[in-house]
Amino acid sequence: MPRPEFRRPLVAAALVLAGMPAVALELGELMAELSQRRAGEARFVEQRFVSGLDQTLQYSGTLSFTAPDRLARHTVAPRPESFVVEGNKLTLERGGRTRQLMLDAQPELAGMVAALRGTLSGDASVLRQHFKAAPTGTLAQWSLTLVPLDDRLLGVVRQLRIDGRQSELHTVEVQLADGDRSVMAIEPVAPPKARASSP
Amino acid sequence: MTSPASWRRAFWPLAAWLAALAGCAAVIVHTRFTADLSAFLPASPDARQQALIEQLKSGLPARTLLLGIDGGTMAQRADASRALAARLRAGGLFEQVQNGERAALADIAQWVFERRYLLSPAIDARRFGSEGLREAIDDTLSLLGTPAGAAVKPLLDRDPTGETQRIAEQALGAGGPRSEGGVWASRDGARAVLMVQARAEGSDLDAQQAAIEQVRNSFSSVAAAGLTLRYSGTPRFAVESRAQIESEVRRLAIAGAVLMGGLLLIAFASLAALGTAMLPVATAVLAGITAVSLGFGTVHGVTLGFGTTLIGEAVDYAIYYLIQARSSVSSQPGWRDWLRTGWPTVRLGLLTSVCGFVALAFSGFPGLAQLGVFSIAGLVAAALTTRFVLPVLMPDGTHGVGLRRHLGRWAVRLVQRLPRARHCVTALGVLGVALLLWHRDHLWQADLSSLSPVSAEALALDASLRADLGADDSGVLVVVQAADVQTLLQRVEGVTALLDTWVQDGRLSGYDAVTRWMPSLDTQRRRQAALPDAAPLRTSLAQATRGGPLPAARLEPFVDAVQRSRSLELVTPESIRGSAVAPLVSNLLLRRADGGWTALLPLHAGATPPDEAVVQQAVHGIEGAQALNIGAELRRLYRHYLGEAQGQALLGALGVVVLIALWLRSPRRLLAVCQPLLIAVLLTMATLAALGVPMGILHLVGLLLVVAVGSNYALYFDLLRHQASFDADTLASLLLANATTVLSFGLIACSEIPALSAIGRVVAPGALLALLLAATYAAPANPPPPREAPV
């Protein structure tokens, strides 16, 4: 599928242009904004571009996050599947079977979960522990690029890019080391919950 | 010994004795000494205990070491872990070295991959219909484009239904320890952890020691400065316990010999007498070891340690002889007099001691049985040496005087004064009974760990490494037994069907089962029968992939693999020999000595640890299957033995009383002999209770020893009571014998080996009490008691 590859530079250029007038976005600033959110529900549509397959793989379902560390992804179509992580406990449901896993025993998954949880909870230290984190844009329209620090994770995931507006995430794009790629578009279902008072 | 007649008289006992010593030495040279748990496990177990013993003795835990690397940076620890693992894999002493490196599992992965259509639980006829194929392929595809897809993608053409993944996810369970820098780490990441399994049997302590040394040497040659190695596990405990027991036994033997020697030297002031007194002791120890070695095949270290305590009792016989044979009144040599006067009492004392220990010798607890046999053989040998060898070497006892005269004077004074305290002591005895009744609920301690010499510090390290590795977290197993291996595997499959539902609902995070690597032949044949011919499979594939992202044309390798699997050699115990999964299987499938088979299914705890009773209930309907909780089972065993030992001790004590009654043939004299023994035992127990020391099996053994030693004292006082006056020499010999006993058991009371210190702390005060009380209850010397003829 040539289209996404073709579109990417354009998007990047647009982002650079959009970011130009403002002062460079600081990671701390972005994290402070993101940490305002304590919980959220969203629908997602994910497209995966996998070499050797005739078509793009498409998945849709819901995402939810509850601070500080509960993250759930329920896939509805094409086949029901769920991925729920809370603390170090990961529960997977796939093909009618449930598995309990320790997240830290799965370094690749742990890296991905750290990227999402760190961003959603606005925890810069978690992100810096696993990634070189580079924000661009403005709070109104930001983009965060995460490059893994760990060689083993880098051998699987080349980089993640998360785009968002204020405290909401809109897109999560993952580039895998073998050239495969996934783009997840996120759309909040409920209006943002009341902003939490400081913890 | 100048005349030919006395030479002849001297020759035979000496020759027999020396021949016996040579025989003992020949046996001992070939004796195997152990320090493993075997002494504390039952000799004739029921089926459930049998499984426990197999698990403890040769099972995985007995040869698994947990390693931790502390200090340095994460990268240094990870490098050290990889380098250490590489050395150990090349070293040949370990059958498995796990440190979380995926490459290490490549052989197993390849083996599984080749047999995926025999091993995967998903294989049935529906799986290869168009609908089943579509679902399976969709499930596999859903991993692509994610980090998890990296493992699946290379296999896609050959394994589009994800059978390898399916087998792996079951086998890996919750995934094990944390992964840091590509190797296992503790959950906080501060320590790299490894788990290694020695090839050798757990009970082969020399081999375990060599394995541990290889770990330490390999680590010191690969590790960066600043890194430290920590290791734990049953092999370490067993090896170090053995070393500790060995050094402790040596220390105790030397200290005991020096103390005893000093005491005897002061008492006799004669080196010859000292040397002679040590002969029955040395003979006793040699005979004890020989008897245990012949009877049990191996000698446990604790038995050996106990042997040093025997010095205290065996030397008594020599002391009695050396002092009493001297006080000859007739023109005959002293030994002839002694045979008439002293020997019958020593013989009776010996018989009562043996009577007490016979009960132990029949214990189902090999540790206790060894102590019993050791004591009986040792005491008999000491008495025989005293009876037959000492008269040859020192026909008139010892001529040395030393402190003996003073000892005699003190003893007489003591004997004259003590009876005044009789009522006071009786009152104390009553008080003791009251105290014991008061404490009766927590008098006895049912905990096997009270016998273990492992320090609290070592146990803490073990617990922390175990937590880091998540090793065998629940301690609960399902044990399945059957006469032949295929029946066993079918039963195991019945259990796994049940356990799968528990994993599904989260009650367990996983379990291990041999059928993952070796399903029953029935199951493997059923799976083979479900594999379709190439033509129908292609048709189903075409339907299943129509309109999907994965073209059927790519899947020809899959069709080939399915066709090959239809005639693949089935997995059997014979076929896996030498393969990559052989160590995995041998941990979970055991061939019993009786030719039957046992399978172990360790359960991994879910949210809460599995309850043995609930598991037992659940597997109740499956023949040959039962739940086993190792910790609880050991406690149950120990409680059982404690109860058994209590019964045996009572029987032994009863035997002692009957024997004395038969000898004395007078209820009054019987009472006079038994009363001080009973009160000595009661007061010793009451003191322990008052000090809050819970009593275990070895305290009980100590009490039996108090009765055995104390009965000698009581019988002597009974003998003296029926003579015209108290003989100062006999009293001196009693006092000296008591001093040596109290000293040698006092030494043992300070031992760091709990099993030995428990015995010492009972016998040292108990023996002293027994002597004092025997004196207290002996009739006053003045006026002499009326002559009393035995009925």
Image: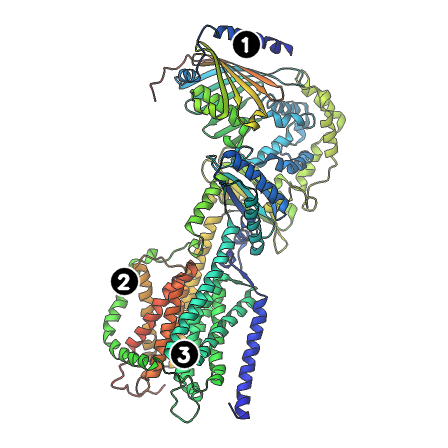
Q: Is residue B789 above or below residue B438?
A: below
Residue B162, percent from left and from top = 64, 28
Query: For numbered disc 1, what is the local secondary structure?
Result: helix
Is residue B561 toward the left or the right of residue B768 in the image?
right
Which mark is first along the chain, 2 or 3? Answer: 3
Secondary structure state at the residue bearing disc 3: helix
**Tag count in the figure?**
3
Q: Residues within 10 Å of mark 1 (few under 14, many from 20)?
A: few
Name the amino acid type tagged 2.
Ala
Identify which residue, B719 or B661, lies in the foreground.
Answer: B719
Chain for numbered disc 1: A
Disc 3 crowd rating (10 Å Cα; few below 14, some 14-19, many 20+) is: many
Q: Which mark is residue B703?
A: none
**Tag 2, which chain?**
B
Picture quarter with the C terminus of chain B: bottom left
Residue position for label 2: B434
Q: Relative to residue B273, is residue A176 depicted above or below? A: above
Q: Residue furthest front?
A: B225
Q: Find residue A12 and name its label.
A: 1
Front residue (pair B69, B355): B69
Quadrant assignment, res B752: bottom left
Whether pointer 1 and pointer 2 mark residues with C-beta atoms closer than 8 Å, the reply is no
Residue sitting at x 73%, y 37%: B568
B35 or B669: which is nearer to us? B35
